[in-house]
Image: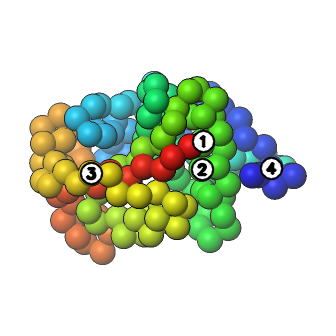
Amino acid sequence: MTRDDEQVREIVDKDAFLAVMMRQWGSHRMMIGLRLYDCAELPLLGLFSAEGRLLAAASWSPDGEIAVLCALHALTEGQGAAVRLLEQVKIAARRSGARKLRAMLTNDNMPGLAFYQKQGFRFSALYVEAIDTYRSVIPTIIKTGYQDIPVRDALELEIGL
């Protein structure tokens, strides 16, 4: 649920968000499972303050019974914007007919793992050494991530809607 002074709407000009993805992950294309998603081509929802400032953005794909969260990014940490926007993505996914929402993290993403578990996501699959395979498709994927941990594996999480 958003605060009364916040608004969720689709972001049409995706350039700023795609630039953040390039900076943080080395690509705006994401491999989830064995499927390639290009966030430049997917719906992008934004959570905006009453003044029109972007607080968080989420790229997701309505893929039938299992919607896929491709990216979720809060522009300021510790203010709950990602949590509030995630709730809106879940509502949109339910409206699209999805029964579950899936997210994928890399093995280095300890803060993300804690975030999704706190939101009720559960582990659904582990893809050992998947990132090397993904790099054959997206060579710009970063080699090291959080606290210089080598990025190697992919962890899939899901939540029922």
Q: Where is residue 11 in the image (x, y as percent from the top left)?
A: 63, 33
Q: Residue at x 12, y 53 (%)?
A: 129
Q: Which of marks 1 and 3 is in front?
A: 3
**Looking at numbered disc 2 in the image, what kind of residue is underneath it?**
Leu
Return the residue found at the far right.
4
Q: Between residues 113 and 7, which one lies in front from this camera angle?
A: 113
Disc 3 designates what residue? Answer: 125
Q: Which of marks 2 and 4 is in front?
A: 2
Give the mark, 4 or 3, whose residue is nearer the N terminus.
4
Task: Indicate the secondary structure of the residue bearing disc 1.
Answer: helix
**Looking at numbered disc 3 in the image, what kind of residue is underneath it?**
Ala
Q: Which of marks 3 and 2 is in front?
A: 3
Badges 1 and 2: C-beta atoms under 8 Å apart?
yes
Q: Between residues 103 and 59, which one lies in front from this camera angle?
A: 103
Disc 1 designates what residue? Answer: 89
Disc 2 designates what residue? Answer: 86
Q: Residue at x 26, y 62 (%)?
A: 107
Badges 1 and 4: C-beta atoms under 8 Å apart?
no
Q: Between residues 91 and 141, which one lies in front from this camera angle?
A: 91
Give the mark, 2 or 4, whose residue is nearer the N terminus.
4
Give the mark, 1 or 3, whose residue is nearer the N terminus.
1
Badges 3 and 2: C-beta atoms under 8 Å apart?
no
Q: In which quarter of the image is residue 36?
A: top left
Q: Where is residue 41 in the image (x, y as percent from the top left)?
A: 45, 25
Task: Indicate the secondary structure of the residue bearing disc 3.
Answer: strand
3D distance between C-alphas at marks 4 and 3: 35 Å
Disc 4 designates what residue? Answer: 6
